[in-house]
Image (cartoon, grey):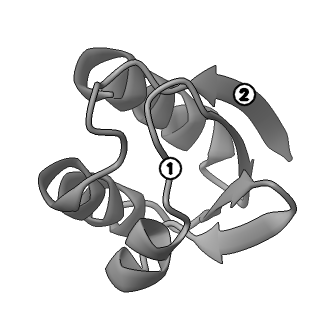
């Protein structure tokens, strides 16, 4: 399992467009991608659950990736977060 933390820099937080792009990206991998904030965890492929976390600018999320392609998924998800959020 690969894990990392990321602090959101986008002034609007995780809103519809990046949440949709993140969910789409997570679906490309066979690994399970989980986003956790304040003790609440959701599968990153579930758009509405992801938006339901209410992640705002300055919030830190924890990302867990587990599965056969976790290395590739971790690199891609980290890159996406840094470039978009």
User: Mark 1 falls on what kind of element?
Assistant: loop
On residue 22, the disc is none
Q: Which mark is residue 55?
A: 1
Report the side of 33 relative to 82 (left or right): right
Q: Earlier in the sequence, mark 2 or mark 1?
A: 2
Residue at x-position 47% and y-position 75%: 52
Q: What crowding class fits label 1: few (fewer than 14 Cα within 10 Å), some (14-19), or many (20 or more)? A: many
Q: Against 4, is 39 above or below?
A: below
Q: Residue at x 61, y 63 (%)?
A: 31
Q: Nearer the viewer, mark 2 or mark 1?
A: 1
Q: Compute the Cα span from label 2 to label 1.
A: 13 Å
Which residue is pictured at 33% across the width and 28% down the height? Answer: 85
Choose between 24 and 29: the one closer to the eye: 24
Q: Nearer the viewer, residue 75 or 46?
A: 46
> How dense is the environment of label 2, judged by Cα within 10 Å: few (below 14), some, or many (20 and up)?
some
Q: Position of residue 70 (x, y in %)?
A: 65, 45
Q: Residue at x 29, y 57 (%)?
A: 19
Q: Secondary structure at mark 2?
A: strand
Residue 7 is drawn in which quadrant? Answer: top right
Residue 1, relative to residue 4: is it above or below?
below
Of 75 and 39, nearer the camera is: 39
Image coords of residue 62 (percent x, y): 73, 41
Q: Where is residue 83 drawn, in percent x and y?
A: 26, 17
In the picture, measured across the screen, residue 61 lies left or right of residue 21, that is right
Give residue 57's quadrant in the image: top left
Is residue 85 left or right of 32 when viewed as pictured?
left
Q: Quadrant of residue 66?
A: bottom right
Mark 2 lies on residue:
5
Say how many tags the image has: 2
Foreground residue among 33 and 12: 12
Q: Is residue 60 above or below residue 73?
A: above
């Amino acid at each position: 399992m690969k894990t990392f933390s990321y602090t959101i820099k986008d002034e609007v937080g995780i809103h519809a467009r990046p949440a949709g792009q993140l969910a789409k990206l997570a679906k490309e991998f066979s690994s399970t991608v989980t986003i956790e904030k304040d003790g609440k965890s959701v599968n990153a492929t579930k758009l509405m659950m992801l938006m339901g976390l209410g992640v705002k600018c300055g919030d830190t999320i924890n990302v867990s990736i587990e599965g056969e392609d976790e290395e590739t998924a971790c690199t891609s998800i980290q890159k996406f977060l840094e470039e978009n959020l």
